[in-house]
Amino acid sequence: MKTLLLAIILLVSTPCFAERMSVEQIMSSSCRISVQHCEKANCGRSHWGSGGTIEEDDSNYYVLTVGHKFYGNLNKFYDGPIYVEYFYAGKSVGKVLANLVFIEFDDKDGSCIDLAMLSVAKSQMQNTPSVIRLENPKFNIPVGTEVFSSSSPHASNTRYFKANIIQ
């Protein structure tokens, strides 16, 4: 597991690309994430974000996301339950519990590291998400190439965004 996490950290810190996929595959790799802030067995408001499924093994899917969603004011760590929610054909297939496998969040000295990795047990999943495996590019992406990404902005359902390489 440590080798996988180290490889992912090194990979994410350099420009990456994924194999060519359809919009539907990209959408099914994305998930909405909620983290609850719990204090003395009382869970309060959730903190929302999104992530992408970038790896799997025999029993888990691994979701890459940002680390800051796990911290509140004064860098207080939120230790409540973590849920991921995948969408198929625009509809939620329900929330499932996730585990925080790795987190690195440090915004000191102007060098921000903001990564987290979640694991989701395959046994909880109703549908199979696409896995977008990141690779180090060996070529330049030509200007004008159409690219897609997906996320859950402002805790909305997952949606995709289209852009073109301009430089």
Image (cartoon, rainbow, N blue to C red):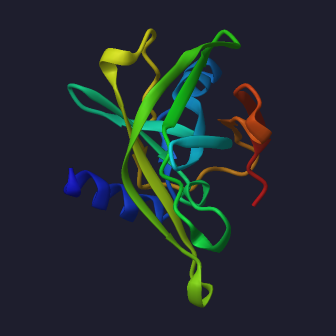
Of residue 16 and residue 79, the one placed in the foreground of this image is: 79
Horizontal relation, residue 164 to residue 5: left or right: right
* Residue 31 position (above or below residue 4): above
- The total number of labels drawn is 0
Q: Quadrant of residue 114?
A: bottom right
Q: Quadrant of the C terminus?
A: bottom right
- Judged left or right of residue 163, residue 21 is left
| Res 151 → quadrant | top right
Residue 35 point in image, percent of width and height: 57, 43
Q: Residue furthest front?
A: 40
Compared to residue 83, the image places residue 114 above or below, namely below
Visible residue check, residue 2: yes
Image x and y of residue 70, in percent: 55, 55
Name the residue rendered at 56%, 15% in the picture: 94
User: Which sits in the foreground, 44 or 91?
Assistant: 44
Q: Can you see residue 49? A: no
Looking at the picture, how far across and down is residue 166, in whole percent?
79, 55
Please name the residue shown 73% across and 25% down the image. Answer: 157
Give the residue displayed 42% in from the left and 35% down from the top: 98
Residue 101 is left or right of residue 19, and the answer is: left
At 29% from the left edge and 61% from the top edge, which residue is drawn? Answer: 6
The answer to whether 105 appears left or right of 99 in the picture is right
101, above or below 152, in the image = below
Where does residue 14 sit, x and y in percent of width and height? 48, 65
